[in-house]
Amino acid sequence: MEPNASGPSPGARTAHNLVKKLGGDEIAGLVIDPSAGEVRFEAYAQRWIETRLVKGRPLSPSTRHGYRALLRRNMIGPLGAMALRKITPEVVRVWHSNLVESAGPDQAAKSYRVLRAILNTAVEDMRIGRNPCRIRGAGIEQAVERPIVDSAVILELAEAINPRLRALVLLAGFGGLRSGEMLALTRTDLDLLHDKVTVRASAAEITGAGRVVGDPKSEAGYRSVGLPRLVVDALDNHLASYSQPGPAGHVFTGPSGGPVRRADLWKEWRRAVAKVADAPGELHIHDLRHAAATMMAQMPGVTTKELMAPIGHSSPRAALIYQHATEERDRAITEYLDGRIAASKAAEPTRRRASVTPLRRL
């Protein structure tokens, strides 16, 4: 049949008019009910924080608290009253630029990541058609390189700090546990007969809620960590002198006998750092965890899985594989750390003599 020279057929004109009327998104099946995007950002974001799941698990109390703080400081003011559908790429770009100027690039990066995650969920909920967060690299922080100290400095810090926190410093510096993980430890978590500590929880202090004990940071946070003999002996002495009684008794306690508070730990830590000449002034207790990981990585022949599992940085699947396959290597790692500690202690008198400048004869 010859084409109709007089113009498109009635069927073609109908299809054309339908496309023109509905638009490309509707034809592609991407229809978004405009009323769904009228919800205000603040209300949606607060609900998102309460219901957010990561790998099937709710956010930890500390993460939830951190998200609320970012929301309150950096997002509610400029974005809170806006309808979701009115947050455009231009709005996001102006907001991010202003935040970099007022709060710095790190705060801007953290806040941008949270905003992007919230609006990704809004897309999944069919409240908006596309995520307006499209600034390349905006969610990447330029992390400041943290100082790394050697085993000799860790030993000095352990001796300089309040005696009731000596074992905690050694556990951080040679076991690689996070502060929250150590503050949540109970006697049940210690198996000193087999030179191990099991991480089952993490403690945080939340404004308005006080001390909150929840799950570790991730699935990989659930782990057993082999300990060098020095740490085991320190923990054994610590349990006899400072820990609460009973299987559920807290390992690390404050002067009043209750669980040690982060503020008190930080205060004692700053005093200890000031006493140790070779300790960088900006050293955080969390830096001891990085020092432990660095020493483990220096062990000849250690594999990535063997390193990441005791530190708690692997995926859940990798952590499970490691737990079943590397028990012998776990003991080898702790023996290697024992050797590093012994070498540092043996060299300590020489270091002290070298640090004394002899008087010059007149």
Image (tube, rainbow, N blue to C red):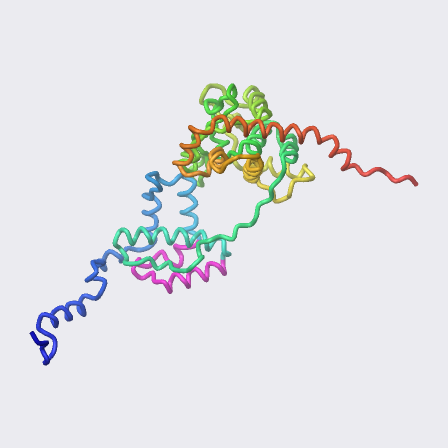
* Residue 316 image point, x, y percent: 39, 36
| Above or below 189: residue 64 | below
* Residue 110 image point, x, y percent: 45, 51
Quadrant (top left, top right, bottom left, bottom right) of the N terminus: bottom left
* Residue 12 image point, x, y percent: 12, 71
Q: Which residue is drawn at the image coordinates 63% and 29% (left, top)?
A: 341
Question: In the image, which residues are magenta?
Answer: 74-102
Q: Which residue extends farthest front? A: 1
| Above or below 96: residue 210 | above
Q: Nearer the viewer, residue 104 or 154?
A: 154
Q: Which residue is drawn at the image coordinates 50% and 21% (left, top)?
A: 194
Say if the magenta span includes residue 77: yes
Quadrant (top left, top right, bottom left, bottom right) of the C terminus: top right
Magenta stretch: dominant secondary structure: helix
Residue 241 appears in the rendering: yes
| Quadrant of the image occupied by residue 7 | bottom left
Q: Nearer the viewer, residue 222 or 322?
A: 322
In the visual, does 91 lie left or right of 16? right
* Residue 199 image point, x, y percent: 45, 30
Residue 264 appears in the rendering: no
| Above or below 316: residue 238 | above
Say if the magenta span includes residue 329: no
